[in-house]
Image (cartoon, grey):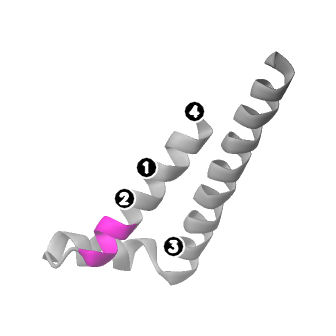
Amino acid sequence: MLAIIGLAALAAQVFILNCGSQACDRAMMTIGLALGAALAALAQFAIILGLWLLWTAWRRGA
């Protein structure tokens, strides 16, 4: 579940960065550069943690 949440957060962030509409620009300015980087790092950590949990659960079951 953590990996899916992290992937969704990163996908949303990439969509906002590549979107050309005024609403996306306003959302990016609201988020800001520092918070955007922190959210990306948190999403990447969630992906890694989720995959690690899946791996350890699979190894224990095997």
Q: Quadrant of the C terminus?
A: top right
Which residue is label 1 attached to? 8
Tell which circle, 3 or 1, labels the residue nearer the N-terminal end. Answer: 1
Q: Residue 60: x percent and y percent?
A: 86, 22
- SS of the residue under disc 1: helix
Q: Work out which residue is located at the far front of the displayed protein and give it.
A: 62
Residue tagged by mark 2? Answer: 12
The outermost residue toward the top is 61
Residues under labels 2 and 4: Cα distance? 17 Å
Evaluate if marks 2 and 1 touch, with contact meaning CB atoms under 8 Å apart.
Answer: yes
Q: What span is colored magenta in the figure?
A: 14-18
Magenta stretch containing residue 33, yes or no?
A: no
State the image coordinates of residue 54 (x, y, percent, origin top left): 70, 33
Residue at the spot 36% in from the left edge and 59% down from the top edge: 12
Farthest residue to the right: give it: 60
The three-letter code of the residue at mark 1 reads Ala
Q: Is residue 15 magenta?
A: yes
Residue depth check, mark 3 versus mark 1: number of the one nearer the observer: 1
Residue named by callout 3: 36
Mark-to-mark CA distance, 3 and 1: 14 Å
Three-letter code, disc 2: Ala
Q: Earlier in the sequence, mark 4 or mark 1?
A: 4
Q: Which mark is residue 1?
A: 4
Label 3: state its secondary structure.
Answer: helix
Residue drawn at point x = 39 percent, y = 59 percent: 11
Mark 4 vs mark 1, CA separation in Å = 11 Å
